[in-house]
Amino acid sequence: MSSELTDLCRYPIVQAPMAGGTSGPQLAGAVAEAGGLGFLAAGYKTADGMYNEIKQLRRLTSGPFGVNLFMPQPALADPSAVEVYRHQLAGEAAWYETPLGDPDSSGDDGYEAKVAILLDDPVPVVSFTFGCPTRDTLDAFARAGTHTIVTVTSAEEAQSAQWAGADTVCVQGVEAGGHQSTHRDDPQLDQTGTGLLSLVAQVRETVQIPIVATGGLMRGSQIAAVLAAGADAAQLGTAFLVCPESGAHLLHKQALTNPLFVRTELTRAFSGRPARGLVNRFVREHGPYAPAAYPQVHYVTSGLRQAAAKAGDAQGMALWAGQGHRMARELPAGELIELLAAELEAARAALSMRSPR
């Protein structure tokens, strides 16, 4: 790992910032205490809500941690396409006895207010999803002593992040659960993502800044593989989703290893942006018709997802999961960090034994 990242955590293991309540203070604190880099997900939270969680996390650990922000999204959605999708979801609203949400809710996720708080009261790391901040913003974080990470899905995005002044790029392979963090949402590129190992190698040859690799990683041996491919650290999300400290809904945790859910798929059904989740009834029925309209579709379906969870119906929930979801291990986050670190060292030792002398 680079010296700056080495100073942040004992192991090259980062807990992914999973929005929607999964990555809260309890999970991030447990990871930080065990020697990994824990992350709070500020997406879909108010600026005050984010700050309150930071204060909670600081009471749980003295270790370093990160906060993830969603970049504001351009107003590119076709209102008529969103309205057609709303009509299609009318049956869901009747079934769950809940109204559809307002698609015209804020599209900037309180970004400027969150940046202001994080500059006024700095945290060790801030990462960005769905785009790259301006150089002025990244320079301001550098002056505050905050390490910045920009999530990318291509070598071109990684190069742009380096030019803008990011300290590190988080390289996201198509295997990753949850939203694909493309900087430009182009429907013509749906289902065309690059696998993590190939992408890490491409980015390593393109930029000189450190790389965090993420996408489908569940075992220490996989961490060893991405480090060998050129990454400086590995970020895992689905692996931590089933931990008791995770804020994910119990049905979501159980679904990861439930034989009813046999595969994942990239879908726009719940948010209007490509996101990998377990294929359930909602994805099958609505995925093919969901428009490219984020965050409008997210707001439209928000009440439906909450109602499905309240009703105990996993078939109507957004069950985000990476391709390695069947390998999930229900362990406390600290124990999982220690196990991953042990597996990593074992994989490195085995590789060393096989190397020609």
Image (cartoon, grey):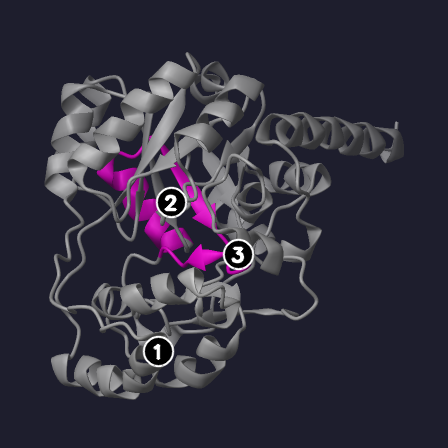
Residue type, label 3: His
Q: Is the N terminus in the top left, top right, bottom left or bottom right quadrant?
A: top right
The spot of residue 110 in percent (x, y) is 14, 44
Would you place residue 128 above or below residue 338 in this image? Answer: below
Residue 205 shows in the view: no
Q: Look at the image and give the residue range highlighted in magenta.
A: 155-181
Decide: marks 1, 2 in contact (CB < 8 A)? no
Mark 2 crowd level (few <14, some 14–19, many ≥20, 10 Å Cα): some
Q: Which mark is residue 21?
A: 2
Front-lying residue, 60 or 14: 60
Residue sitting at x 88%, y 29%: 353
Instruction: Give the quarter of the image for residue 347.
Output: top right
Front-lying residue, 168 or 333: 333
- Between the residue at mark 1 and the residue at mark 2, the CA separation in whole angstroms equals 31 Å
The spot of residue 309 in percent (x, y) is 43, 61
Residue type, label 2: Gly
Element on which disc 2 rests: loop
Asked if residue 341 lies left or right of residue 305, the reply is right
- Between the residue at mark 3 and the residue at mark 2, the CA separation in whole angstroms equals 12 Å
Q: Nearer the viewer, mark 1 or mark 2?
A: 2
Residue type, label 1: Gln
> In this figure, which residue is indicated by the disc labeled 3?
252
Element on which disc 3 rests: helix
